[in-house]
């Protein structure tokens, strides 16, 4: 099993910093810290192409000051989910203070040209005097150079050229991982999708155990960004016990993604075993006793006998400090420090209150998770409205499945919301056929009307049978027409 290659660049903390400074929901101290970190990264890593892409007075995606033009150009506030972008996809921050410095840009550009010239000489010498291994190393250095300075097109082209001339299957997989991270860096979902499929094909053709496990984290994160949480949950949760892809994100970050994907997509039994009682999750998200229990290997069976019983357990959501997700995604040496800076209590409250049926606490925890996690992470932010809506739906379904009739005011009180809010929220889900119930506002009740399994199967057979008969009729007409033509 070879060691992973090409894992140093790109640094995925940089796009998180860019997201922070364009995200109006990000706290001002975090924005300021991210701006400083971004400026330092541009200088230290000589990122002239990225600097131009971000801050150029005419072409820069961040520069709204209009320097170099008589009138600032209005920029769209929203981006297509399929269009590559580095900035926040929802409302942009009104002021982004990444100033354009022409002198700095020219210095960075000159340094890039000198380094590129040195790499070119190394390639020539390797081609003339050394072997194929040294030549491949020089080519790899060129690809990593383009990736480090933030030139998307050149880095992808260099890695693809390198892959064509590489015989090692492990190296090809590592190159695919590098291209996936470039796609994640620039928010290019189509590039990531295509390269994940290619990496999966390479791993299936004989990839080693380590790269096979690393691919799970890459696939899971990609599926999360395209809102396929039901598929992402399986990949993310199974990768927790064997996670080594620290170039992709930190372990704490993976825990957050796995918990959220599992919470919104898994059935109750799987949710219990894979999220609520998972020792890997308890070791990070749980309270002091749960962490000690998980780390010592003693897993809690939990109230498994009461899976189908909804209990109203009164609890209050403790006040929690804002989560700084800029700490998520650092290397292994910083993971312990990052984990200490993150307050996971909203996440823990969300999981436990949903499972135990404490819906008032669940709604409070969901709000806290939205503010402290969904708003602050570049991968989660784009789908936060959908996630919050689906979690509300899940809680409604979980309560209603245990009753035939529920008082509207009683249910509103259980969730800690007004009757008008609950009525309006349920109305939207009922219209979309997501909840099998009717709301009788006159009598103040909610009646469930879900069909039993036999009736559902019967209706499905009738519907599919009608479709089949229609297709056979069309096929018969086509055959008769062709027969008459032959005659």
Image: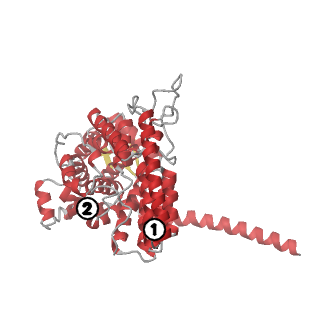
* Residue positioned 45% across, 71% down in the render: 130
Along the line of sight, the residue nearer the viewer: 57 or 402: 57
Q: Secondary structure at mark 1?
A: helix
Q: Secondary structure at mark 2?
A: helix
Q: Name the residue beneath numbered marker 2.
A: 272
Query: Total marks drawn?
Result: 2
| Quadrant of the rendered image containing residue 211 | bottom left
The N terminus lies in quadrant: bottom left
Residue 206 location (% of width, % of height): 42, 77
Residue 255 location (% of width, % of height): 27, 56
Q: Nearer the viewer, mark 2 or mark 1?
A: 1
Q: Name the residue beneath numbered marker 1.
A: 136
Q: Earlier in the sequence, mark 2 or mark 1?
A: 1
Determine whether label 2 and label 1 are within 8 Å by CB.
no
Looking at the picture, the colour scheme in use is: secondary structure
Q: Specify the farthest residue to the right.
A: 487
The C terminus lies in quadrant: bottom right
Along the line of sight, the residue nearer the viewer: 315 or 228: 228
Residue 381 location (% of width, % of height): 38, 44
**80, above or below 120, in the image:** above
Residue 348 location (% of width, % of height): 22, 51
* Residue positioned 28% across, 50% down in the render: 328
């Amino acid at each position: 099993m070879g060691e992973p290659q090409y894992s140093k660049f790109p640094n995925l903390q940089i796009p998180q910093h860019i997201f922070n400074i364009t995200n109006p929901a990000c706290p001002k101290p975090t924005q300021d810290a991210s701006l400083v970190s971004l400026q330092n990264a541009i200088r230290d890593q000589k990122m002239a192409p990225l600097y131009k892409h971000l801050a150029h007075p005419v072409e820069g995606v961040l520069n709204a000051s209009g320097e170099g033009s008589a009138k600032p150009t209005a920029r769209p506030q929203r981006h297509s989910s399929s269009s590559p972008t580095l900035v926040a996809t929802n409302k942009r921050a009104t002021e982004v203070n990444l100033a354009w410095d022409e002198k700095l840009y020219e210095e960075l550009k000159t340094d890039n040209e000198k380094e590129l010239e040195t790499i070119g000489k190394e390639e020539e010498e390797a081609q003339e005097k050394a072997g194929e291994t040294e030549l491949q190393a020089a080519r790899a250095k060129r690809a990593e150079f383009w990736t480090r300075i933030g030139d998307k097109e050149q880095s992808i082209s260099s890695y693809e050229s390198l892959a064509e001339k590489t015989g090692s299957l492990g190296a090809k997989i590592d190159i695919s991982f590098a291209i996936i991270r470039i796609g994640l860096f620039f928010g290019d979902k189509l590039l990531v999708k295509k390269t994940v499929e290619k990496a999966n094909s390479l791993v299936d053709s004989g990839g080693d155990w380590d790269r096979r496990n690393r691919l799970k984290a890459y696939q899971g994160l990609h599926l999360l960004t395209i809102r396929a949480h039901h598929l992402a949950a399986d990949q993310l949760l199974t990768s927790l016990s064997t996670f080594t892809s620290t170039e992709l994100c930190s372990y704490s970050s993976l825990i957050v993604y796995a918990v959220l994907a599992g919470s919104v997509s898994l059935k109750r039994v799987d949710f219990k075993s894979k999220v609520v009682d998972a020792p890997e999750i308890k070791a990070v998200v749980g309270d002091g006793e749960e962490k000690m229990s998980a780390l010592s290997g003693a897993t809690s069976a939990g109230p498994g006998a009461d899976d189908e019983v909804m209990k109203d357990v009164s609890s209050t959501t403790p006040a929690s400090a804002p989560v700084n997700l800029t700490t998520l995604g650092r290397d292994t040496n910083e993971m312990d420090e990052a984990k200490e800076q993150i307050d996971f209590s909203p996440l823990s409250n969300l999981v436990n209150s949903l499972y135990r049926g404490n819906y008032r606490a669940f709604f409070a925890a969901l709000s806290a998770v939205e503010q402290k996690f969904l708003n602050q992470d570049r991968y989660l932010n784009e789908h936060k409205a959908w996630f919050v809506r689906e979690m509300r739906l899940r809680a409604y379904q979980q309560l209603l499945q245990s009753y035939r009739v529920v008082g509207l005011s009683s249910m509103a009180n259980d969730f800690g919301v007004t009757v008008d809010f609950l009525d309006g929220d349920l109305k939207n889900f009922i219209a979309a056929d997501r909840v099998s119930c009717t709301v009788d506002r006159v009598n103040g009740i909610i009646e469930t009307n879900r069909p039993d399994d036999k009736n559902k199967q019967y209706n499905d057979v009738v519907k599919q049978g009608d479709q089949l008969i229609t297709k056979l009729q069309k096929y018969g007409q086509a055959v008769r027409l062709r027969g008459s033509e032959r005659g």
